[in-house]
Image (tube, coloured by chain):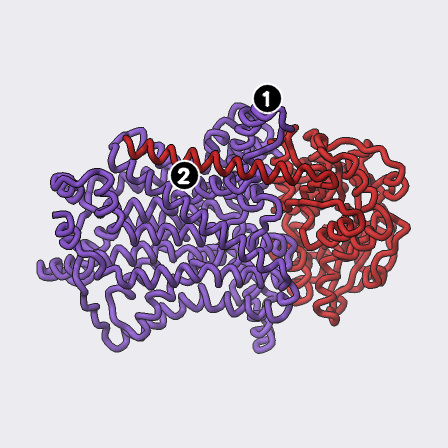
Chain colours: A purple, B red
């Protein structure tokens, strides 16, 4: 429905603003957006896949630590990393000040407020998507396929390119897709860097010209981009299906030799340092310097609201995503697939635009259904849906369904259809198959999905701001209030709390996924069914 | 199919249950007469002290949501007649003007307000009222700039500032309003030349906020910038030995550009009388002091003195052009800045 609201915006074409945009801005904006997408896309792919390969398949010092630690940056919202990086690397920041004290000048230092800087920040924030999904793909696939390829005479590199990577492809593609959609939707980070993209143009049409129609029209164009990306990916994948015959047993990781080990260590350490340790330390410094003044009774409330909203949304989104992916599997309907794809599109829309679309949809329901009903009942008419907890939850479902759908659908795809058929042929009823075959096998995917959504909801800003019930302020709301006034140091406390709270589920995820290998070999489930 | 029906049934019943609960809780809260609902794009930590104070004095309970002005205006539009909001508080006259243009506000006739708020700081038709004044002027590095060399906003376009100017992004409404007043005074062509001059003189790409621009001047990346005075005040509180100083722009000509943060009563206010009473209270000296001091701004009520630090920056001549012009010319200003390459 929110998408429909956006598309309907075209009935009132904003000639004036479009002409102005085309004359002055559009070329630059498109080029900027494209450069950003290509940069972030390759960045997250290279970093995410290489780190996932290293931590799952190779042995080097600190591997066990990096295995889970490299997921930590996921808890850091893009807008937080952006303001931390700007504060730290800017001309007036501590690093360049020290450089000037030593060398007299820092003019040679590359400006962080550049295309490269934005790409760096977004890659560091979004690579965990690829890392997580590639990692579970590599774990699932184990060493068997690689060994087979080696026996057939491929070099290690060839085996990686021609066997390991293609098998992991659905996971990697899903990860890169999420990262790219986040990039398209991002406003906080690019605005902090004053880097103009398509999304900033949407905001400009809205906040500057107060022309929501033009903003919505721009947003539909953005959706077109995403559709094209989806289509390209699907075409690229073609009809190839990758199903592994069985999950591998414990595998022995590859041993790296002397120098390789330290290079691997240094690489993993520097990514972790840049993406997580540096920002957390900088936030801590700010908290100690200034942020502590804001700790009061209400702060606990902020944390509570954040956690409650995030868990409720996590649960709800996972349920809906599960329904959707089952529907997709069971009813091989063309239109259903299209509809599911459309539902996933919401993720690439700038949060505020989607939020306003959702809000309009809800207030339409209120105005045309509930208000007449209230009048008929003789109650004073008011908005029932908008500003309620339920509406906010629905908004989260619409916004984050893609995040949950990816891992769940990927998990479902790896369950062979024959397994389902086998269970049915053994006389197990439909619902029991779900309970006894699908749910256990999907558990890791469900958990991943739930946690991704949990953390994303905690970080989510625009929909929460616009639709929260009175008094339901969260950590993200507090961060918005501070950063929008440029008071980054005071934003550090809620930001740090947000990061720490986001770490809890990441830890849980890591602990669980370590047991993933030995969990429920297929033969066991089959035994149970007989 | 049965599974599908089961799920949809569960979902529907869940939906209805939640709605009922929300309805009951809402109904009980609106039974309370002494109540006000406020949508505010002025930040919570700057207004909450006032809400608390008012509730303490009068017992009127205030509920509020904060967000950026764009979403709040969109929300009020979508809600139409059923909006719970009684009052809209925001920064920048441009935003208030937009809210009024979209028919979201209603005029208020009040002697207290007419007496307390000067003519150029409110809507000519009394749809909205300024509650605090924010001045946008120059800040320079004391070791590199002689104050005599500074004069007007227009002069920052001259070649003597080549490579010495830092500015905040044109996407911020403060700069749009400033350029809007230039258009009102000098016309499109002259203003465009000036803005192009600014862009030519930039020492670094434009910044995303005023504080960053100030820090760049302090660090020596550039020599002069244009900011709202309270940002300078905040930085000064943090680092008292700042080598920066304020310069009041355009004192010999039009006066320094001022804008407001202000409020209006919504068209469909459910608690109109309470809302007007609160607005009047906000314009009185006691509240004005809190309102302005919370953010080191200038009180709109001229009988109230600004805080000590703010007063130490000296008195200055305001641009007397009605702040409403900023709203009216905002669209033109944005287009002009786009053409001039000011992003």
Q: How many marks?
A: 2
- Identify residue for label 2: A345
Residue drawn at point x = 52 percent, y = 31 percent = A361
- Residue in front for this viewpoint, A421 or A218: A421
Residue A20: x %, y % from top left: 59, 34
Residue drawn at point x = 83 percent, y = 48 percent = B300
Q: Is residue B187 above or below residue A489?
A: above
SS at badge 2: helix
Report the chain holding disc 2: A
Residue drawn at point x = 46 percent, y = 38 percent = A222
Describe residue B47's horizontal placement relative to residue A295 as left or right. right
The reply to the same-chain question for discs 1 and 2 is: yes
Describe residue A232's horizontal placement relative to residue A180 as left or right. left
How crowded is the residue under tag 2: few (<14 C-alpha within 10 Å), some, or many (20+)?
Answer: many
In the rendered image, is residue B147 in sight? yes
In the rendered image, is residue B186 in sight? no
Describe residue A485's horizontal placement relative to residue A177 as left or right. right
Residue A100: x %, y % from top left: 59, 73
How crowded is the residue under tag 1: few (<14 C-alpha within 10 Å), some, or many (20+)?
Answer: few
Residue A205: x %, y % from top left: 59, 37
Point out which mark residue B55 bears: none
Residue drawn at point x = 70 percent, y = 29 percent = B103
- Residue in front for this viewpoint, A240 or B185: A240
Point out which mark residue A376 bears: 1
Report the chain holding disc 1: A
Ranked by sequence position, the earlier of labels 1 and 2 is 2
Describe residue A66's horizontal placement relative to residue A368 as left or right. left
Answer with the quarter of the image where residue B30 lies. Answer: top right
Query: Distance of mark 1 from mark 2, alpha carbons?
Result: 38 Å
SS at badge 1: helix
Answer with the quarter of the image where residue A295 lies. Answer: bottom right
């Amino acid at each position: 429905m929110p998408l429909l609201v956006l598309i309907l915006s075209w009935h009132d074409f904003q000639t004036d603003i479009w002409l102005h945009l085309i004359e002055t801005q559009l070329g630059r904006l498109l080029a900027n957006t494209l450069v950003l997408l290509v940069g972030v896309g390759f960045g997250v792919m290279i970093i995410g896949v290489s780190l996932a390969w290293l931590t799952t398949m190779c042995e080097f010092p600190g591997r066990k630590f990096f295995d889970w630690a490299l997921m930590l940056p996921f808890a850091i919202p893009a807008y937080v990393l952006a303001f931390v990086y700007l504060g730290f690397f800017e001309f007036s920041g501590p690093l360049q000040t020290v450089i000037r004290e030593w060398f007299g000048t820092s003019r040679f230092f590359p400006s962080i407020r550049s295309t490269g800087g934005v790409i760096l920040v977004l890659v560091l924030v979004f690579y965990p998507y690829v890392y997580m999904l590639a990692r579970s793909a590599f774990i699932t696939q184990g060493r068997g396929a690689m060994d087979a390829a080696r026996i057939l005479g491929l070099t290690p590199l060839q085996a990686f390119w021609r066997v390991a990577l293609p098998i992991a492809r659905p996971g990697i593609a899903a990860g890169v897709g999420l990262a790219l959609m986040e990039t398209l939707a991002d406003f906080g980070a690019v605005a902090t860097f004053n880097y103009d993209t398509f999304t900033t143009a949407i905001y400009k049409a809205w906040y500057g010209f107060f022309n929501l129609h033009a903003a919505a029209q721009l947003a539909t164009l953005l959706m077109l981009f995403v559709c094209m990306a989806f289509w390209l990916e699907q075409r690229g994948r073609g009809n190839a299906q990758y199903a592994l015959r069985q999950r591998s047993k414990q595998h022995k990781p590859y041993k790296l030799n002397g120098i390789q080990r330290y290079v691997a260590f240094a690489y993993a350490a520097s990514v972790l340092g840049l993406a997580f340790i540096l920002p957390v330390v900088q936030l801590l410094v700010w908290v100690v310097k200034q942020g502590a003044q804001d700790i009061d009774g209400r702060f606990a409330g902020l944390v509570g609201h954040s956690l409650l909203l995030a868990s409720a949304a996590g649960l709800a989104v996972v349920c809906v995503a599960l329904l959707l992916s089952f529907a997709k599997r069971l009813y091989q309907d063309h239109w259903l697939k299209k509809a599911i794809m459309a539902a996933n599109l919401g993720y690439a829309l700038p949060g505020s635009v989607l939020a306003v679309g959702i809000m309009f949809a809800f207030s339409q329901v209120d105005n045309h259904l509930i208000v007449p009903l209230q009048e008929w009942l003789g109650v004073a008419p008011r908005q029932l849906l908008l500003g309620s907890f339920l509406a906010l939850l629905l908004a989260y479902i619409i916004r984050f369904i893609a995040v949950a759908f990816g891992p769940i659908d990927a998990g479902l795809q790896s369950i062979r259809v024959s397994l389902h058929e086998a269970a049915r042929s053994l006389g197990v009823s439909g619902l029991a198959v779900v309970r006894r075959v699908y749910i256990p096998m999907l558990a890791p995917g469900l958990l991943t999905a739930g946690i991704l959504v949990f953390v994303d909801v905690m970080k989510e800003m625009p929909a929460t701001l616009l639709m929260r019930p009175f008094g339901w302020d969260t950590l993200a709301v507090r961060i918005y209030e501070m950063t929008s006034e440029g008071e980054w140091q005071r934003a550090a406390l809620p930001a740090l709390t947000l990061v720490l709270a986001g770490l809890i589920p990441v830890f849980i995820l890591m602990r669980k996924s370590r047991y993933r290998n030995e969990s429920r070999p297929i033969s066991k489930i089959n035994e149970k069914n007989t | 199919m049965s599974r599908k029906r089961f799920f949809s049934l569960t979902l529907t019943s869940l939906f209805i249950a939640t709605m009922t609960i929300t309805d009951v809780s809402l109904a009980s809260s609106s039974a309370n007469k002494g109540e006000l609902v406020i949508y505010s794009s002025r930040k919570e930590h700057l207004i909450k002290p006032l809400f608390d104070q008012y509730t303490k004095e009068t017992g009127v309970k205030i509920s509020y949501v904060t967000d950026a002005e764009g979403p709040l205006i969109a929300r009020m539009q979508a809600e139409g007649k059923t909006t719970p909001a009684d009052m809209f508080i925001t920064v920048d006259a441009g935003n208030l003007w937009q809210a009024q243009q979209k028919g979201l506000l209603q005029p208020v006739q009040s002697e207290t307000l007419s007496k307390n708020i000067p003519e150029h700081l409110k809507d000519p038709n009394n749809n909205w009222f300024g509650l605090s004044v924010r001045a946008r002027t120059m800040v320079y590095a004391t070791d590199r700039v002689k104050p005599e060399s500074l004069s007007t906003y227009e002069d920052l376009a001259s070649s003597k500032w080549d490579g010495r100017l830092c500015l905040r992004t044109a996407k911020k409404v403060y700069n749009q309003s400033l350029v809007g007043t230039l258009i009102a005074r000098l016309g499109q062509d002259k203003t465009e030349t000036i803005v192009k001059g600014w862009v030519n003189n930039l020492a670094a790409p434009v910044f995303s906020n005023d504080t960053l621009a100030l820090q760049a001047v302090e660090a020596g990346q550039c020599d002069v910038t244009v900011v709202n005075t309270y940002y300078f005040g905040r930085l000064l509180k943090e680092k008292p030995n700042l080598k920066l100083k304020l310069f009041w722009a355009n004192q010999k000509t039009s006066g320094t550009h001022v804008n407001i943060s202000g409020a209006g009563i919504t068209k469909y206010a459910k608690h109109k009388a309470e809302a007007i009473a609160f607005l009047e209270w906000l314009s009185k000296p006691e509240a004005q002091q809190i309102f302005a001091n919370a953010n080191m701004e200038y009180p709109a009520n001229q009988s109230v003195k600004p805080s000590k630090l703010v007063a130490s920056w000296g008195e200055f001549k305001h641009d007397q052009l009605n702040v409403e012009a900023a709203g009216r010319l905002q669209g033109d200003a944005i287009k002009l800045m786009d053409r001039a390459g000011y992003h």
